[in-house]
Image (cartoon, helix red, strand yellow):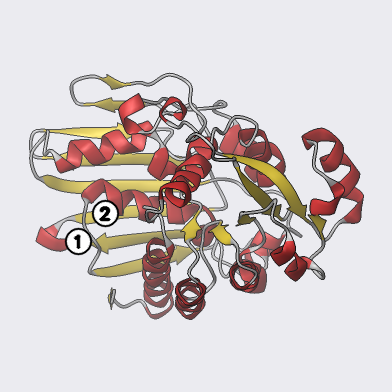
């Protein structure tokens, strides 16, 4: 049965666990004589409405102060529901005037992938720090230009990798870093779902840059990178299509194999045709896994010895507070533009391997 993307990602619950040592919201406190940083959401689609805006009602260091939309009919609803001053409401056309708004410190770009590059650069040039949703852009070149602009204007650029703040995934990283089960032997990382509306932008290659790899497969790429603590050296890939006209522009199902140092291989799959969601890491003396692994909540984890479990936690709130904390403390974000650039280099290599049938080195 097909399910829309928002319901799919949220169907397992509202939050995931947290340890205070790993970034609980309780660890964030606004320094004395410091005001909360204002965030403007650019693009009022389902992720903004049902995840980011509600999370900003729970944040400690930042708050929702502005919106940018191309749909005037949405304005009154948002202004009323989230108590936004109408002077902090912008359209895509007058967006650059945001530079004069002292109530907005951070711009969060939540638009179709093809628009990330333009609005990130416009926001940076307007003197605002930026969080850009993943994937960072549609090409490596665009990512490089975004990073260069941030450096030029002296503002921070972060990518919306919420799972870097999630305790389940942080536990995976810890188990790997401490070699709890010895050296790694193999990784499985899969994420896919049955996509709905055939007219949506995610099935338009010009807007999305690709199919499920750009949308949810990127989670699997990320998981193999921080789950191994290594960077991939090469990739092979194969796509499979059923003939459904819905996928005439983008891949339907894609399998890819990431080769890491020391002979480690990550077998990955992503799809818009069926549900699949898992991260499993095999080591010399055992394994550890998350399944479900990437949605907006309700993760289940276990090792070869015990379950992994944490109390309720809001990933998006922790992600945005984490960035605000970096700005307040004048320190770099752990999910900066270089992280998004590396994923895009890997994605371009995967698509090249898919198209040529050859192994492609990742540079």
* Mark 2 residue element: strand
**In this rendering, which labeled residue sits more in front, label 2 or label 1?**
1
Number of marks present in the image shown: 2
Quarter-wise, where is residue 283 in the image? Answer: top left
Near-viewer residue (40 or 109): 40
User: What x and y, as percent, mark residue 34?
Assistant: 54, 40
Near-viewer residue (105 or 201): 105
Q: At 82% from the left edge and 61% from the top edge, which residue is drawn?
A: 70
* Mark 1 residue element: loop
User: What x and y, as percent, mark residue 87?
Assistant: 84, 52
Q: At 45% from the left edge and 65% from the top edge, which residue is drawn?
A: 239
Q: How dense is the environment of label 1, judged by Cα within 10 Å: few (below 14), some, or many (20 and up)?
A: some
**Residue 251 visible here:** yes
Cα distance between the residues tagged 2 and 1: 8 Å
Q: How dense is the environment of label 2, judged by Cα within 10 Å: few (below 14), some, or many (20 and up)?
A: many
Q: Which residue is mark 2?
A: 266
**Residue 248 visible here:** no
Q: Is residue 143 left or right of residue 189?
A: right
Q: Is residue 189 left or right of residue 299?
A: left
Q: At 48% from the left edge and 62% from the top edge, which residue is drawn?
A: 156
- Vertical placement of residue 97 versus 81, above or below: below
Q: At 82% from the left edge and 45% from the top edge, which residue is drawn?
A: 85
**Image quadrant for the N terminus?**
top right
User: What x and y, as percent, mark residue 305?
Assistant: 18, 21
Looking at the image, do the residues carrying marks 2 and 1 touch, with CB atoms under 8 Å apart? yes
User: What x and y, as percent, mark residue 128?
Assistant: 60, 62
Q: Which residue is mark 1?
A: 260
């Amino acid at each position: 049965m097909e399910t829309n993307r928002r319901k799919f990602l949220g169907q397992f619950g509202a939050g995931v666990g947290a340890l205070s040592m790993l970034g609980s919201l309780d660890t964030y406190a606004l320094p004395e004589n410091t005001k909360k940083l204002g965030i403007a959401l650019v693009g009022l689609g389902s992720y903004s409405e049902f995840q980011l805006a509600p999370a900003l009602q729970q944040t400690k260091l930042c708050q929702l102060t502005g919106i940018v939309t191309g749909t005037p009919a949405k304005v009154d609803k948002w202004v009323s529901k989230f108590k936004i001053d109408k002077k902090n409401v912008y359209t895509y056309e007058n967006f650059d005037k945001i530079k004069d708004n002292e109530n907005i410190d951070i711009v969060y770009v939540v638009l179709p992938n093809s628009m990330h590059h333009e609005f990130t650069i416009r926001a940076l040039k307007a003197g605002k720090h930026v969080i850009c949703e993943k994937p960072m852009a549609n090409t490596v070149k665009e990512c490089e230009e975004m990073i260069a602009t941030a450096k030029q204007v002296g503002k921070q650029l972060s990518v919306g990798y919420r799972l870097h703040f999630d305790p389940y995934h942080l536990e995976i990283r810890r188990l790997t870093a401490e070699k709890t089960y010895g050296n790694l032997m193999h990784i499985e990382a899969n994420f896919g779902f049955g996509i709905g509306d055939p007219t949506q932008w995610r099935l338009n290659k010009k807007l999305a840059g690709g199919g499920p790899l750009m949308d949810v497969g990127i989670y699997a790429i990320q998981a193999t990178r921080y789950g191994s603590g290594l960077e991939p050296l090469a990739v092979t890939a194969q796509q499979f299509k059923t003939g459904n006209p819905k996928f005439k522009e983008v891949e339907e199902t894609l399998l890819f194999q990431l080769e890491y140092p020391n002979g480690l291989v990550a077998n990955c799959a992503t799809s818009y045709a069926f549900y699949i969601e898992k991260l499993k890491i095999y080591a010399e003396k055992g394994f550890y896994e998350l399944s479900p692994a990437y949605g907006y909540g309700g993760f289940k984890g276990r090792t070869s010895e015990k379950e992994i479990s944490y109390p309720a936690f809001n990933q998006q709130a922790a992600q945005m507070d984490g960035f605000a904390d970096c700005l307040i403390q004048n320190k770099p974000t752990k999910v900066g533009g270089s992280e998004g650039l590396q994923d895009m280099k890997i994605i371009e290599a995967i698509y090249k391997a898919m198209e040529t049938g050859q192994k492609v080195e990742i540079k």
